[in-house]
Amino acid sequence: MKIRVLTLFPQMMEGFFKSSIMKRAVEAGIVEYELIDFRQYATDRHRTCDDVPYGGGAGMVLKPEPLGKALDAIGALDRRVVFATPSGKKFTQDYARELSREDELVFICGHYEGLDQRIIDRYVDDEICIGDYVISSGEVATLVIIDAVFRLIDGVISPDSLSEESFTGPYLEYPQYTRPEVYEGMGVPEVLLSGHHANIALWRLKKRLEKTLSNRPELYDESFLDDKTKAKLKKIK
């Protein structure tokens, strides 16, 4: 996948693409990226990229000309363009999975009070909200979307690691433990030390159900369970 990011602060993004799992995906040729400082497309002496909003109001709005020129330079009209905004559609794991199937994505990082609406009308395909809150940096919101998307691309993470994560299916992920066996007087559940794979699988399913019913009950869906498993879990529910 080719990822292009239009931003006023490319230095905020650079470290993400050069670290951890993303770094390995880039080095393996699974992901290619380009960070575009659209301030370079401003034509006035001060490289101005924002101005006061028509109709009055607080804050500044990103001007359409620099962004439009930057988008035209990469042929954005022929590519899927994503803009993170509190007024967008809710971002979900299914949405991330859909975006991960694209060969190329273009992201616009908003700032201040947002973009001139004409840029959205002309170029943007997806307005995405990462949650019911507001943050000051479009770069941070964009990285949330990119991180959720790229890890679902074939070859980035093993399918086994993805299969039981939260939001894969109707339940949240079960608790995880590693060495040492005892930490600050707290032990590892005995079933995980038993080597009995069927019992471990049932324990993990029980814990997924408990956490889901406790933290996100609206996600619970019994249609994913067979009758035998439903009977085993009925008491816990």
Image: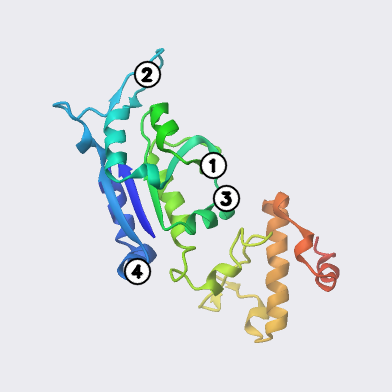
Closer mark to the observer between disc 3 and disc 1: 3
Dot 3 and dot 1 residues touching (CB under 8 Å): no
Give the mark nearer the N terminus: 4 vs 3: 4
Closer mark to the observer between disc 2 and disc 1: 2
Q: Quadrant of the C terminus?
A: bottom right
Q: Which residue is mark 3?
A: 92
Q: Which mark is residue 211?
A: none
Residue placed furthest toward the front: 78
Dot 4 and dot 2 residues touching (CB under 8 Å): no
What residue lies at 51% left-to-right and 44% top-to-bottom?
130
Give the mark nearer the N terminus: 2 vs 3: 2
Give the mark nearer the N terminus: 3 vs 1: 3
Q: Which residue is mark 2?
A: 53
Give the mark nearer the N terminus: 4 vs 2: 4
Dot 1 and dot 4 residues touching (CB under 8 Å): no
C-alpha gap between disc 4 and disc 3: 25 Å
Residue 191 spot, x, y in % from top left: 68, 80
Q: Is residue 101 above or below residue 40?
A: below
Residue 74 versus residue 5: which sits nearer the camera?
74
Q: Residues within 10 Å of mark 3 (few under 14, many from 20)?
A: some
What residue lies at 39% left-to-right and 60% top-to-bottom?
1
Query: Quick one: SS at disc 3?
Result: loop
Q: Which residue is mark 1?
A: 131
Q: How is the image coloured?
A: rainbow
Q: Residues within 10 Å of mark 1 (few under 14, many from 20)?
A: some
Quarter assignment of residue 207: bottom right
Q: Which residue is mark 4?
A: 24
C-alpha gap between disc 4 and disc 2: 42 Å
Residue placed furthest toward the bottom: 195
C-alpha gap between disc 2 and disc 1: 25 Å
What residue lies at 44% left-to-right and 60% top-to-bottom?
150
**In this rendering, position of residue 217 left or right of residue 37:** right
